[in-house]
Image (cartoon, rainbow, N blue to C red):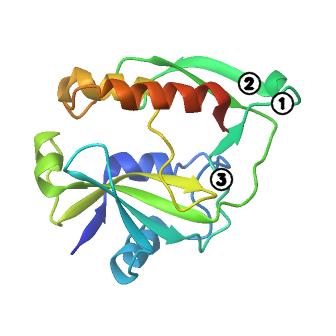
Amino acid sequence: MSIVLTDFARARLFPRDGRLTAIRDCTPEEFARRLNDEVPLKVLDGYAPFCKLHVHANWTSTRGSVLAITDANRHCLRSAYEARARDELPVLVRWFEGIEPPVARYLVPILYDRGQMAKEGTPIDADWGIVGCLYTMEPEEIPMAPITMMRNALGVDEGGSGVPIDRAAYRRSVAFWERNANWR
């Protein structure tokens, strides 16, 4: 099985602006090489048949990506309308500022198969393309954000995958993200 880092994921996981939410202590090339050379601790099914998540022990100093919202940190929440890429419509996002979570125990790369990558206009010369990565404390998936589920349901032209919303998964996602937020 071969894995490549997509340009979309490279920009998000290894941004040039030095933000703290980037993967630390390795280059994009080293990251992809490690995923190709190391057997994951486990493989999780993603939200669609073309999506898999590989769980790896974190070998970097990358911090966890999600924090629980509490009365003590609620004042650190921020929000804005943002797009992940120039051709996508901005959506409302929220995050913590001024808080640094602990180092993640696991890196969980999100992989799409070659067929889906081609469907989304990003042909790859590998079996799998990295489209994202979760930085977690447990060897499990963090629920996809509700807005990501909606974008996926809108289709490839809007930056999604074309997978319809699973209403039960959406409700689980809302329950999780009402109590948690990303940080920057």
Quarter occupied by the N terminus:
bottom left
Q: Which residue is identified by label 1? A: 73
Q: Quadrant of residue 24?
A: bottom right
Q: Residue furthest front?
A: 168
What x and y, as percent, mark residue 121? Answer: 15, 41
Q: Which residue is identified by label 3? A: 64
Tags 1 and 2 touching, CB below 8 Å: yes
154 vs 133, left or right, is left
Which SS class for mark 2?
Answer: strand
Which SS class for mark 1?
Answer: loop
Tags 3 and 1 touching, CB below 8 Å: no
Amino acid type, callout 1: Asn
Q: Is residue 85 visible?
A: no
Whole-angstrom CA distance, mark 3 to mark 1, is 16 Å
Tags 3 and 2 touching, CB below 8 Å: no
Q: Earlier in the sequence, mark 3 or mark 2?
A: 3
Amino acid type, callout 3: Gly
